[in-house]
Amino acid sequence: MPFVELDTLIEAQANLALADLFSLHGEGYYKRLSYEILLKVLSQNDPMVVATGGSIVTDPESWQLLKRRTHTVWLKATPEDHWKRVLGQGDTRPMANRTSAMAELRSILTHRTPLYSEAAQTIDTSAQQVADSVRAIAGFVKGGKTNKVDKAERL
């Protein structure tokens, strides 16, 4: 199944790296562009996996579109795991020269949790390997189920 990363499409459309896009045009522009591109992607009606940034839930229009048109999955993780994954991808920008970065991350996750929990499926990725998370998602999608999953459910 094709994998589509929304932020990559946004960067291509804007011809800017995300950091530059935010710096030059702000979050409002990013959200408008994100919604427009998401609408185009979903209008293809082809099966695909669409990866979005975690902030998509803070844009009601985009979040409602996703919930109506897709099988949404919250890839839940501890703040420490989020931190390690971002650093593992080579992105030190969110933490650079910020002594309160972990506290800010915790606050963001706390405030977004009620929105994330609206996803059709929840996978606690801190409790299992990537392959197990993929199997859990695939099993629910193939079975047409939209139950919440917590911790390491093995299929």
Image: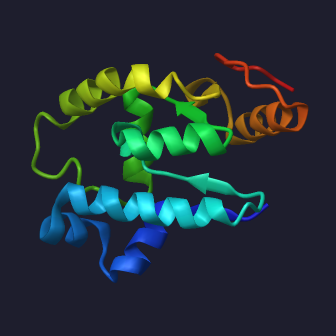
Quadrant (top left/top right/bottom left/bottom right) for the C terminus: top right
Q: Position of residue 64 (x, y in %)?
A: 49, 38
Q: Is residue 79 left or right of residue 128?
A: left
**Residue 124 location, quadrant:** top right
Determine whether, in the image, residue 83 is placed left or right of residue 46: left
Query: Viewer-proximal residue, 137 or 37?
Result: 37
Determine which quarter of the picture holds residue 83: top left
Q: Is residue 9 left or right of residue 109?
A: right
Q: Residue at 36% of width from left, 65% of height from top? A: 33
> Residue 23: which quarter of the image?
bottom left
Q: Residue at x 56, y 53 (%)?
A: 51
Quarter in which the N terminus is drawn: bottom right
Q: Is residue 107 left or right of residue 149?
A: left
* Residue 141, placed above or below residue 38: above
Q: How many marks?
A: 0
Tell me what residue is drawn at x 41 percent, y 44 percent. 61
Residue at image location 43% in from the left, 50% down from the top: 53
In this rendering, is residue 58 above or below 120? Answer: below
**Residue 101 at what x, y percent from top left?**
18, 37
Residue closest to the eye, 146 or 102: 146
Describe the colour scheme in one phrase.
Answer: rainbow
User: Furthest residue to the bottom?
Assistant: 15
